[in-house]
Image: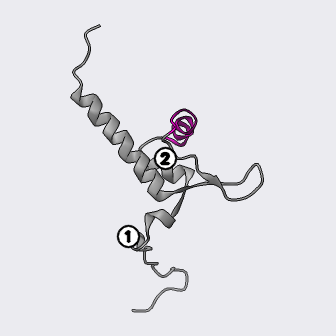
Amino acid sequence: MQQNQTEQPQKKPVPVNKFDPRFVQVSRREAAAIIGRSPTEFDRLRKKDKRCPKGYKTGEGVAARVMFRLSEVYRYSEALLEDAKEGEDTPPSRD
């Protein structure tokens, strides 16, 4: 089968399961998606929740991107899930 010159060859997806999450960097948007929040809500959590990963800048400028270690995002996601589970175990108050 001959490939049309305008068609791009199919790229194989990167096998992310081969990477150690301790050494993988994710963007703010990706980190927010992992924990099921919007990027804006993720920014609020970074300011008010000490457990939330703060990230690190990739450069020295004010506009430098902030990246996050994937393993820290996973750890924070697990903490949020535990918080939710503990909330389910507590009977609702009757105020």
Residue 3, placed above or below residue 12: below
- Specify whether 88 is left or right of 83: left
Whether label 1 touches label 2, CB < 8 Å: no
The x and y percentages for residue 92 are 24, 18
Q: Secondary structure at mark 2?
A: helix
Is residue 86 in the magenta section? no
Q: Tag on residue 32? A: 2
The residue to which callout 1 is attached is: 17
Per the rendered image, the range of residues in magenta is: 38-50
Q: Residues within 10 Å of mark 1 (few under 14, many from 20)?
A: few
Q: Tag on residue 1? A: none
What's the amino acid at mark 1? Asn
The image quadrant where one finds the N terminus is: bottom left
Q: Residues within 10 Å of mark 2 (few under 14, many from 20)?
A: many
| Marker count (numbered) | 2
Q: Quadrant of residue 39?
A: top right
Q: Residue at x 43, y 73 (%)?
A: 13
- What secondary structure prevails in the magenta region? helix
Toward the front, the furthest residue is 50
- Visual colour scheme: one colour
Closer-to-camera residue (29/52): 52
What's the amino acid at mark 2? Ala
Q: Secondary structure at mark 1?
A: helix
Marks 1 and 2, how far apart at CA: 20 Å
The x and y percentages for residue 38 are 49, 41
Residue 41, placed above or below residue 35: above
The x and y percentages for residue 66 are 63, 52
Toward the bottom, the furthest residue is 1
Q: Residue at x 40, y 46 (%)?
A: 77
Q: Residue at x 51, y 66 (%)?
A: 23
Q: Earlier in the sequence, mark 1 or mark 2?
A: 1
The x and y percentages for residue 8 are 51, 79
